Image: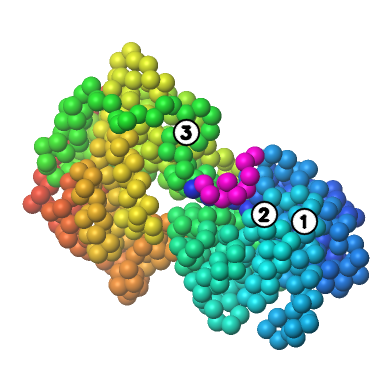
Amino acid sequence: MKPFAEALRSEGPLLFDGATGSLLYERGIFLNRCYDELAVSQPELITRVHRDYLEAGADIIETNTFGANRLALARHGFSEQIEEINRAAVRLAREVARDRAWVAGAVGPTGIKFSLATESERALGRQALAEQIAVLRQAGVDLIMLETFASILEMETALAAWRVAAPELPVVAQMVFDAQCLVEGALSPVQVAARLTAAGAQVVGANCGVGPQELYDVGSQMVGHGAPVAIQPNAGLPSIVDGRTIYVANPEHFGVFARRMLKSGVKMIGGCCGTTPAHTRAMLGAVRMVGAAATRPHVQSGERPLPRSGPPAPVVAMAERSRLAGRLARGEFAVSVELTAPTGTSPAAVTGKVAELIAGGIDVINIADGPRATARMSNLAFCALAQAATGVEPILHVCCRDRSYLGLVSHLLGSHALGMRNLVIITGDPPKMGDYPFSTPVYDVDSVGLVEIAAGLNAGIDPAGKEMDGHTSFLLAVGAEPGAVDRDRELRRIEAKRAAGAELIMTQPVYDPDALTSFLDQVEAFRLPVLVGLLPLASHRNAEFLHNEVPGMQIPAAYRDRMARVGSGAAARAEGIRIAQEALAAVAGRVAGAYIMPPFNRVDSALAVLEVVKGRWQPQAAPAARSPLIAE
């Protein structure tokens, strides 16, 4: 593996392992044991924990040495075994990690209350920390991990000890924040980041104390203040169940917040108390997805195609590729409605929704590719069946999550053969831990790379640069998040997609009119048509879920308050439609069209939203069905 310092300088995110202590407790080790000493007395148990985290996808394995400084070990009678315990712990982690992960030497606080301690007590603490760091360095760790420090004074002392004992090793410094996002002394995340950076920390951050929501707030505030940020939350707050301490934040919850944290600019994520290899596995999908987006604009692993100076010229002019492409080329206001594919084997229920849309004048639909990483009928299969039976024109979503590089190329060629002419290419949501906990994301290529592949196919060139037998004629759309926390990064991504061959931008749902307006101002330079995405809110609960749980979705408090006043049911749906209508009316003159994402496939809501642009959008006559492939 490359040196950790080199990996730290790269743009891609890194994944720590999770808790050791709480996992050992769950596996039957009583709380009165010295957990650090288990590296000597029960090495097979520690090895199993490390191996479980490595197999879950961790890039960094922490040694079982959190409490292995002389002062902490003295409380269990092991102070004279400090070197033996630390060396044994490093050896076990290294044997598991080999060349697949870096080994971090974990160093925790001494137990001295630094804010009240005398100078001699502080000197004793500094001595103990320097001693442990020196042993970890000699034993061969890749980096020093200073974690779970509540006192900024003790953390600064630990950094001073690191500068003396192991200055050539990278150091990560993580503090404990409370629910108000403050550390001892009422210091804010920005103040903490400044002090830790000034003390020499190459990575700053937070761990333990609170769960992912609170540490998301901490991490996003620390980003951009002098050093990369590492965040390792607890699995929520602990509960006592049948006399055992249980952490209740589930892995799916962690997967969602991992993506949010990484997209806010956090560089490294992992888990602390209560997390398990399942939590690590949930975060792995987010790391792969964001990592592919940030650092691997083409292929994630293996040989990469030679970069092109720009997309090759397509064989078929845009106006001739599809019904939708023709409307965009002529400057007509284009509309589409997004439906979710069936969860079972029968397409009839969703095909009925297509028929309702056609009756309302909508002849273009878009079908997502396993949205929210759910298991559904293949969207390609459904699009082909619906197009054959009703004449509707699909926009096929293609995500990079589930198919290898070769699989994606085959998927595109097969899609074209089945009549698909409109694609929206996305990296895709990482798998969630739920009904399918062992589903593995692929992400051989991200959305930029896949756009480049599709643009080549449109020019009759395969990904290896060879002429094909024929060519595709796709309209190439890409997604964008106007509400992204890091707008600059989002704009860079759009520019990369445009350079790769993107021809249309389709936005995530937007509720903040100021955010949408500023986004449209900024993307004008790309000279790409924009379809604005709108998702009518279904209820107050739905609004809160989207705001708090879905990355890139920010719903202003004023709209959430409006939904709270009407609650749920028909009144809530009507209010959600009004909010979407207001958003569409505000930008109708600035966008090329709109696509509506009605909750639960409620097509009546979609048609109602479009009422406000009837002057710009003309309902279409029903298209002719091609063949009766769908049995009623």
Q: Quadrant of residue 554?
A: bottom left
Please tell me which residue is depicted at 67% across the width and 54% down the height of the picture: 168
- The residue that label 3 is drawn on is 299
Q: Is residue 404 above or below residue 368?
A: above
Q: Is residue 261 visible?
A: yes
Q: Is residue 592 above or below residue 123?
A: above
- The quarter in which the C terminus is drawn is top left
Q: Which residues are magenta?
A: 1-10
Disc number lying in front (1 or 3): 1
Residue in front for this viewpoint, 587 or 86: 86
Mark 2 surroundings within 10 Å by alpha-carbon count, few (fewer than 14), some (14 through 19), many (20 or more):
few
Mark 3 and mark 2 lie on one chain; the one further toward the N terminus is 2
Q: Is residue 13 left or right of residue 16?
A: left
Please tell me which residue is depicted at 55% across the width and 82% down the height of the picture: 186
Which residue in the rendered view is the most extreme toward the front? 164
Which residue in the rendered view is the most extreme toward the left? 615
Main secondary structure type of the part rendered in magenta? helix
- Contact (Cβ within 8 Å) of mark 3 with mark 2: no
Image coordinates of residue 541 in percent, x first then y, are 41, 66
Image coordinates of residue 142 in percent, x first then y, are 69, 50
Residue in front for this viewpoint, 36 or 52: 36
Mark 1 surroundings within 10 Å by alpha-carbon count, few (fewer than 14), some (14 through 19), many (20 or more):
many
**Cα gap from disc 2 to disc 1, whole angstroms:** 13 Å
Whether residue 3 is in magenta: the answer is yes
Mark 3 surroundings within 10 Å by alpha-carbon count, few (fewer than 14), some (14 through 19), many (20 or more):
some
**Cα gap from disc 1 to disc 3, whole angstroms:** 36 Å
Mark 2 and mark 1 lie on one chain; the one further toward the N terminus is 1
Please tell me which residue is depicted at 54% across the width and 78% down the height of the picture: 187
Disc number lying in front (3 or 2): 2
- The residue that label 2 is drawn on is 168
What amino acid is at disc 2?
Answer: Glu
**Cα gap from disc 3 to disc 2, whole angstroms:** 33 Å
